[in-house]
Image (spheres, grey):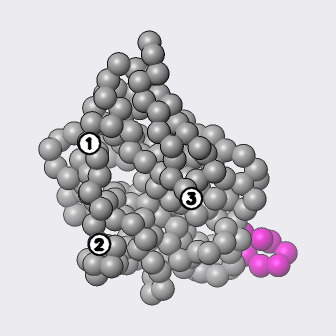
Amino acid sequence: MDITYSEQFPKHSDVEYIAAEGNWNHQPRLPKKLNPKDPKYAKILKEWGRYNELQLDDFEVSEVLEIDIDNDQVQETIIVANNMHAPIITEPNRFSAILMYKNNIPFEVASFHLSPESAKHCGLDNICYGAIYTLAMFLDYDGDGVLEIITDDKVNDGRGQSIRQWKGNKFNIVLSWGCGH
């Protein structure tokens, strides 16, 4: 087989390109950008936060996209948000998340969150590290018609990427790579 798909990663990523082999269309559906300032996305994040025992008052929804992930002819909403500026944290209610909103339910694509209970264990003697997630791209990596989501993460002094696949009402990492610690 020939390499049939190659794309440059967005500027925020340390990875320059990804290539996939196969004789299918690796990007059969493209996302549509939505307005991240729309208050309904902040409401979805606050509901997700309450479910995870987080009080989310201060955060930014940085990106919202609409795309049919699972090829069921229904658009899912992908929401990227966080309130972390560095992956070293000690304060409660800090998070970074990529969520898929489907059938009025937020599903975690990738997330890190520090609950008030967990934050009690963080301090100068016990540094807590988190992950800051961003969305890199959508790609039908394996040719099954379902789009995988490729995420970029920053953790302490390292960066990594993961291919996450929707199966059984959750996202699973099927491949990840990175550098650093």
Question: Is 115 on the left-hand or right-hand side of 74?
Answer: right
- Range of residues picked out in magenta: 122-128
Secondary structure beneath label 1:
loop
- Between residues 78 and 102, which one lies in front from this camera angle? 78
Residue kind at label 3, given as amino acid type:
His
Secondary structure beneath label 2:
loop
Crowding at label 1, few (<14), some or many (≥20) Cα neighbours within 10 Å?
Answer: some
Residue 174 visible? The answer is no
Which residue position is annotated with label 3?
12
Residue 87 numbered mark, or none: none
Task: Pinpoint residue 112: horizontal percent, then vertical percent.
Answer: 55, 63
**Residue farthest to the top?**
1
CA distance for labels 3 and 1? 22 Å
Which residue position is annotated with label 1?
29
Which residue position is annotated with label 2?
35
Residue kind at label 2, given as amino acid type:
Asn
Secondary structure beneath label 3:
loop
